[in-house]
Every structure is written in structure tokens, then in C-alpha cells.
Image (cartoon, rainbow, N blue to C red):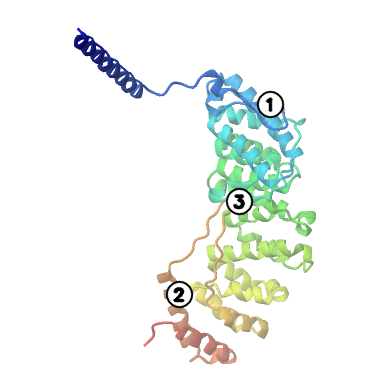
Amino acid sequence: MKRLKQRFLWSMALALSAGVAFLIYWQLQQPEPAPTEAQSTPEVLPGTGFKELSVAAVLALSQDEQMAYLRELIDETREQIRLNRDAVSIREALDRLKTLTFELPAAVAAAVLEAALLDPAARDVSTGLHFSVGAKGFLADPSSLRVAFLDWLGQLAPQQAGVIAQQILSREGSADEWAICLRNYAWANPGARSHPYLREQTRALMNRPDLQAQPTAGYLEAFDVLVFTRSVESTPLLIGLLEDSDEEARATAYAAFLTLDRLVMQQPAEMLRRLNESRALGNIRPEMRAQLMARGDMRDPAIRKEIAHYLLDTQRTQVELEAFAGVFPNHNFMLSDNLLTEVDIPTGVELNQRDLAAYQALQEWMTQERFAGTSEWLEQMRLRLASYLPID
């Protein structure tokens, strides 16, 4: 009897163990429980009474509720930026707002951004960040909340952004806003038909004396629009911006020179012809004209003709010739992110071919009597090229 009782208890223990094991196995096979209401409780942003919802929670709302929430978040972000001048905190607030803006349906976000931009009662606020352009012409940092809205609207709804851009460009205002609006208008109106308007508005911006003397980052970035529109007729304006030797205008002068340089790389024959016909740049910045002329690709007969004309010009100074000889052929390039254009860098093979063509032209000219006055400089350039070209 005692043995039977022990066997019974042992059987019960085995059954209980098996049940526990099955229960554990069953629990492991079950999916993770859905978040409870407590897990999605809105967080209160520090220093405000605003309750922040997750992106998923906002997307679950109706479109009217989404618009209302985005408007409220914009107000809170504006206040956070106004009260907090720490760059890290400001970027976090902007990133929070941008993330939600781009997660919402584009039509919803664009409607709210457009309303905020057109509302005369809406206060703008400076971010204290440096206006800077990143990849694809998108802003890496906006200088104000309105500039951020213009940047985001241009990405989300180009046509709407183009309409607003034309309204803003119809009146004098923030140079940073103008820079983004020029980009947005170009995106909304692709093709050469928009170029005359873009050139006109960009030149109007460039001609503002207050900005020439104390340029904003957006003002300097807007020079890229002249490259985008292939604005060779802006050469006199750009040369004029190089005349001011004031320390405060140095950034403007540098932007003007880079724009001339990029126009020369983009349309070399036309630009070298213009630089030869007008000696204005040689009179005020001879070293700069020398660097631009040294861009010439001697494989092109039209460019070769312009370089020969330049070297034979009796009004060109020795200072300028010395600067030309020191850099020809000019293969210095500057990489940058721009509002509308990309910098096209030639391959090593192409640069080698340009150097060889330059070497052959110099050798030929050294045998011609008309170049006797420049033979010293021709030989200097020839020897420098011969030092690294594979010439037998």
C-alpha cells in the first residue's frame, strides 16, 4: 500500500512537471503583446505643456487632426527655438518637426507649411544656425524657421513652392529666403524658359548694396543660380563685384570670382572671348583674369585662338603674364554642394590629354616670330609640362 502511494505521488509530480514545461513552451510561441495605452502615453516636451505624440499615433489621426497637430508642433518648435539658443537643442527641435512633416501625407504637410508661410501674423524666428547647403541642394541648416519651411516645401510640393517663391521674389526681403525661393522656382519650372526670370531676380539680389557689403550665407549661395542659368551676360556684374576692396565685401568678391570661374569651365570659348574683349578684370584683378584664362583647353581651336590673342595682347601686363605662366593649364577645382548645380570634375585621362595639347601648342608657338616677346614664359610653361608628361 505504501509502495502504491509513492508510485501515485511520483506520477503526479511527473504530470505537474510536464504541464509546467508545456505552459512555458506555449508562452514562448505566442507573439509579443501589442503596446498598451499606457505605453503610448504622450510625452510632455521639456519646458512646455505640449504633449508630444509618436509619429504612428499622429498618422492614426484624421487629416484635419493631423493638420491641427502639426500646426501645434510648429508653434511649440518656434517657442523652443526662441527660448533656447543652444545649437544642439535647436537642431533636435527642428529634426523632430521635420521628421513628422515628412512622415505625414505630402498634401497635409504642404498645406500646413504653405499656410504658415503666407500667414502675415506668423512670427519668424532665427535659428542662429549658419545657412548651409547639403546634398541635392537641400539645406543642411536653415537660418530661420521660415527658411526651413521653404526648404521643406520645395521638396514636398515643388509646384506649390514655386508659386510661393514667385510671391516672395516680387518684393525685397531676406536674402536667405530669396536664395531658397530661386531654387524652388527653378525646381517648379524646369527648362530654359525659366532662365530669364531667374537671371533677372538673381541679378537684382546681387545688386543690393547692403548685401554686397555684408552678405548673408544665402546671398553668397544664390550666385549658383547664375551658373545654373548659364548667365555669361552677367560677366560685367560679377567683375564689378570684384572691384570693392573693402574687408567686409571680401566674401562677395570671392563668390563673384568662383562664379566667373565656374562659368568659364561651363562655357569656356564664350567666356574667354568676353574676358579678352573686356580688360576690366585685368585692370582691377590681373591675377584673377590670368587664372581664368589659364582654364583654356587647347584641344579646342576656338579656345586656342583666344589664348593666343591673350598672350599677344600688348595691353596685358607682365604681372598678369607671370601669373598665367605659373598656373597654365589651370586644373584646380573646388568641390561643393550647391543649390542647383554640381561641379563636373574631368577625369585624369582627360586632364592628361589637355596637358599634352597645351605642351604641343607651346612648342609650336615658340617657333613663331609673333610670340618672341613671350618666349621666356612659353618656355617656362613648356618645361613644367615636360617634367611630368610622358614625352619621348
Dot in front, 2 or 3: 3
Say which quadrant the N terminus sits in: top left
| Residue to which mark 3 is pinned | 133
What is the three-letter code of the residue carrying label 1? Phe
Q: Nearer the viewer, residue 229 or 368?
A: 229
State the CA–CA distance, disc 3 to disc 1: 31 Å
Q: Is residue 267 visible?
A: no
Decide: few, some or many residues near mark 2? Use Cα within 10 Å; few <14, some 14-19, many ≥20. Answer: some
**Callout 3: SS:** strand
Q: Earlier in the sequence, mark 2 or mark 1?
A: 1
Say which quadrant the C terminus sits in: bottom left
Q: Position of residue 387 (x, y in %)?
A: 46, 86
| Residue to which mark 2 is pinned | 354
The residue drawn where x is 71% and y is 62% is: 251
Q: Specify the farthest residue to the front.
A: 2
The relative height of residue 312 versus residue 342 in the rendered view (above or below) is below
From the viewer's perspective, tell me whether residue 340 is left or right of residue 24: right
